[in-house]
């Protein structure tokens, strides 16, 4: 009997480079010949739990899987729900929703960039990116009262109006971030070691990317110009001018560059949002009428919404609805089946990370063992989001 | 009564002479064991503090606040001392326990061949230029043994990586030492320093050799960007995955000691050794030795600081890239350095 010539390596779930999952790699020498991401370690049954909660209680639930990207998940769910509710959303609320989602996008990309840096050994990039999330968290707190999971977007509008000095603060943060992006380029993006590690590594070709169905920055990094914000604009993205970032190479470095440029685009989008922000109510009239008059006075004074009593048992029409939004890590899909009761009959969420997990196999076969963390970081994979 | 006092004085004097004799002083006190431990604590503290500064953090802070947490490392050491030492069931137990101790000791060994002034040496040899790197090549073999005895896939991969790296850094290192031996026309560290007093520092005479040697120094001491054999996010500190407690400290300390030894060596060969303290200041040889040793230590400290600073700016290369760099760049560079030395000697500059 001959000795086996390959080694099966179990990376994780207790491994600094695996996240909350197990990567099963079979290596021949240093070359990976088989690779299986083994997901499901942080499955929390979000879809099943949703069937036992009222529609409003589902919001915090669907936010939880994606820590850094809570408001995009929130928005996707609400967009689907509103199709069943038949409610007119005031334009100011649309803009406020976009504002928070874009802040979240920068936040999420910074988070990914930090993890990416740590994965290939640049601890400084990790610290810098994680610290520069802080001003964005502070902004979210000013706008919504919470730092991470906001539950800001509710059926009919948003929970709070724009604070008075918010515009000044956010412009200050952006001028700071733009300075920092230059530093990132110097330290990490243009660093010869980074380029040596990432260029030509983990290539996913254009056809492969489309075939296996990866989404978001990873898809655009392979040269497919697909972004839900452009293809099927929701909220008021059709009124905003921004570029669709694509890179042709499809390697880890291309994905890094796409994320870096998308942060700049998000800043551009937020600047436009602040300029174009329409006046008017931030919560649908249909529901605002149901708030009792004394409460309404308080709401008008403080700019903080009090829910109408109806919300405790919101009953949308019988039927099904879907929504698609572009979350930070890619296309996010919701499907709601309503049987006319206060709880959803079925909630299906297909998260971007769940789709991106297919990217591992496509990118890693034939690469070296040391490329596993590089590809992991470049896909910006987030296990809780994939496992739900 | 007088006799007893005289005898006591004599015994104390004898002990004192023994302590300040180079054969004891160099390996045990300075630049040997005691200095190594102090340098180790200081260097790791400095590395953490510097990295923290760049990364906009505080670093070690709470233990001894007013001196910047300098004894944090002592606290960490205590914590590791009291940690349970786990020997894996499938490990080769005897080797598993002995290898880190031998690694630590053998890494420290080359210090005996390092002179700290022109007269103060533990080994009276004309081959010290060769002896230091030769003794230093013993330690990496222990890393391979550690990886093998742990019986863990990650340790095994880590020690294989170390094995590949040995080849790619040691050859350029020895060839660049050869280049300097040609330039100084000697294999003695003392004469190398004397030569540098006359002409210029080795760094100026043959910068190619200095660059090749520094590159190899970073590789051998597992500094970034050549951290591949211990890569945390890839193979979980490589050969040392299974270790805990004080044995883990031995393993982690070894690369730092290696860095210290090679920095001393680099200062002697390329940075003029104890220059400008060439002429003895006092009549006592031990005080002279300490003074010139301090000059040497400061130079080595600068080299070590540069080496640990790399952590903050670079990521980590891949193993094949490191090997390529070693064989294609450093090896070529060291050959060029030899040619440069030969040309300089041929032209009669040296």
Image (cartoon, rainbow, N blue to C red):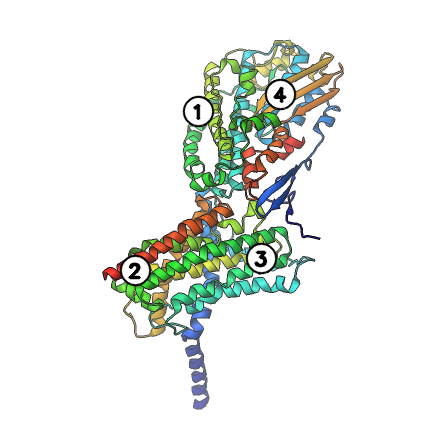
How far separated are the C-alphas under marks 2 and 4?
72 Å
Left/right of residue A48 with respect to residue A7 in the rendered view: right
Check disc 1 and report the residue beneath it.
A171
In the rendered structure, find residue B248 and report the number of the disc placed on it.
3
Q: Mark 4, chain letter?
A: A
Q: Element at badge 1? A: helix
Label 1: few (<14), some or many (≥20) within 10 Å? some
Q: Indicate which label's residue lies in the foreground, 3 or 2.
A: 2
Q: Element at badge 2? A: helix
Q: Element at badge 3? A: helix
Whether discs 1 and 4 lie on one chain: the answer is yes
User: Which quadrant of the figure contains the C terminus of chain B?
Assistant: bottom left
- Label 4 with label 3: CB-CB less than 8 Å: no
Of callouts 3 and 2, which one flags the residue occurring earlier in the amino acid sequence? 3
Check disc 2 and report the residue beneath it.
B342
| Percent x, y of residue B196 | 29, 63
Check disc 4 and report the residue beneath it.
A76
Kindly tell me whether residue B276 is visible in this rendering. no
Identity of the residue drawn at 28% across and 65% down: B195
Label 2: few (<14), some or many (≥20) within 10 Å? some
With respect to residue A197, does B258 lie above or below?
A: below
| Percent x, y of residue A294 | 63, 13
How far separated are the C-alphas under marks 4 and 3?
49 Å
Whether discs 1 and 2 lie on one chain: the answer is no
């Amino acid at each position: 009997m001959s000795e086996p010539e390959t080694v099966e390596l179990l990376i994780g779930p207790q491994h600094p480079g695996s996240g909350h999952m197990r990567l099963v790699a079979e290596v021949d020498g240093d070359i990976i010949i088989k690779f299986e991401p083994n997901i499901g370690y942080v499955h929390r049954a979000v879809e099943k739990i949703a069937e036992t909660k009222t529609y409003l209680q589902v919001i915090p639930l669907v936010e939880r899987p994606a820590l850094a990207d809570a408001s995009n998940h929130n928005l996707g769910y609400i967009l689907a729900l509103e199709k069943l509710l038949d409610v007119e959303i005031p334009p100011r609320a649309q803009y406020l929703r976009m504002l928070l989602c874009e802040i979240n996008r920068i936040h999420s990309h910074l988070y990914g960039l930090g993890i990416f840096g740590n994965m290939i050994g640049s601890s400084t990039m990790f610290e810098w990116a994680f610290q520069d999330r802080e001003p964005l968290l502070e902004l979210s707190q000013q706008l919504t009262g919470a730092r991470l999971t906001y539950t800001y977007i509710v059926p009919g509008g948003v929970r709070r109006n724009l604070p008075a000095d918010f515009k000044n603060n956010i412009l200050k943060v952006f001028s700071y971030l733009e300075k920092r992006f230059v530093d990132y380029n110097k330290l990490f993006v243009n660093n010869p070691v980074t380029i040596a590690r990432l260029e030509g590594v983990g290539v996913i070709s254009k056809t492969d990317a489309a075939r296996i169905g990866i989404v978001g920055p990873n898809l655009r990094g392979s040269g497919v110009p697909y972004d839900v914000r452009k293809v099927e604009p929701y909220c008021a993205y059709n009124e905003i001018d921004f570029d669709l970032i694509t890179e042709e190479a499809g390697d880890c470095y291309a994905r890094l560059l796409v994320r870096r440029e998308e942060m700049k685009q998000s800043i551009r989008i937020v600047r436009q949002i602040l300029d174009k922000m329409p006046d008017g109510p931030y919560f649908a009239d249909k529901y605002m009428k149901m708030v009792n008059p004394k409460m309404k006075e308080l709401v008008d004074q403080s700019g903080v919404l009090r829910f109408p009593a109806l919300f405790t048992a919101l009953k949308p029409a019988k039927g099904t609805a879907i929504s698609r939004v572009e979350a930070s890590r890619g296309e996010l899909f919701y499907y709601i089946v309503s049987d006319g009761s206060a709880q959803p009959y079925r909630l299906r969420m297909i998260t971007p990370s769940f789709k991106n997990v297919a990217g591992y196999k496509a990118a890693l076969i034939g690469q070296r063992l040391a490329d596993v963390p590089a590809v992991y970081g470049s896909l910006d994979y987030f296990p809780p989001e994939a496992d739900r | 009564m007088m006799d007893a006092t005289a005898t006591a004085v004599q015994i104390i004097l004898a002990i004192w002479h023994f302590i300040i004799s180079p054969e004891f002083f160099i390996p045990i006190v300075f630049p040997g064991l005691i200095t190594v431990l102090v340098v180790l604590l200081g260097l790791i503290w400095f590395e953490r503090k510097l990295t923290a500064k760049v990364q906009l953090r505080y670093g070690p802070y709470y233990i001894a606040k007013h001196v910047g947490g300098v004894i944090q490392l002592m606290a960490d050491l205590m914590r590791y001392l009291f940690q349970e030492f786990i020997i894996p069931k499938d490990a080769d137990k005897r080797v598993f326990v002995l290898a880190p101790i031998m690694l630590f000791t053998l890494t420290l060994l080359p210090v005996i061949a390092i002179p700290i002034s022109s007269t103060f040496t533990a080994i009276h040899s004309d081959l010290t230029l060769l002896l230091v790197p030769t003794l230093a090549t013993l330690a990496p073999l222990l890393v391979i043994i550690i990886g093998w005895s742990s019986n863990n896939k990650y340790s095994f991969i880590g020690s294989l990586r170390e094995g590949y790296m040995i080849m790619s850094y040691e050859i350029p290192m020895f060839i660049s030492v050869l280049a300097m031996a040609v330039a100084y026309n000697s294999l003695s560290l003392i004469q190398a320093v004397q030569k540098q007093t006359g002409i210029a520092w080795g760094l100026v005479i043959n910068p190619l050799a200095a660059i090749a040697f520094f590159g190899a120094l970073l590789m051998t001491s597992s500094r970034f960007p050549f951290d591949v054999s211990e890569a945390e996010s890839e193979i979980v500190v490589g050969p040392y995955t299974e270790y805990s407690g004080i044995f883990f400290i031995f393993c982690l300390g070894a690369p730092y000691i290696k860095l210290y030894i090679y920095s001393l060596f680099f200062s002697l060969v390329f940075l003029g050794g104890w220059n400008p303290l060439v002429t003895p200041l006092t009549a006592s040889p031990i005080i002279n030795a300490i003074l010139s040793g301090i000059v040497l230590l400061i130079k080595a400290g600068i080299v070590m600081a540069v080496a640990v600073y790399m952590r903050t700016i670079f990521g980590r290369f891949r193993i094949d890239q490191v090997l390529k760099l070693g064989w294609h760049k450093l090896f070529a560079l060291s050959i060029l350095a030899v040619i440069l030395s030969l040309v300089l000697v041929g032209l009669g500059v040296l």
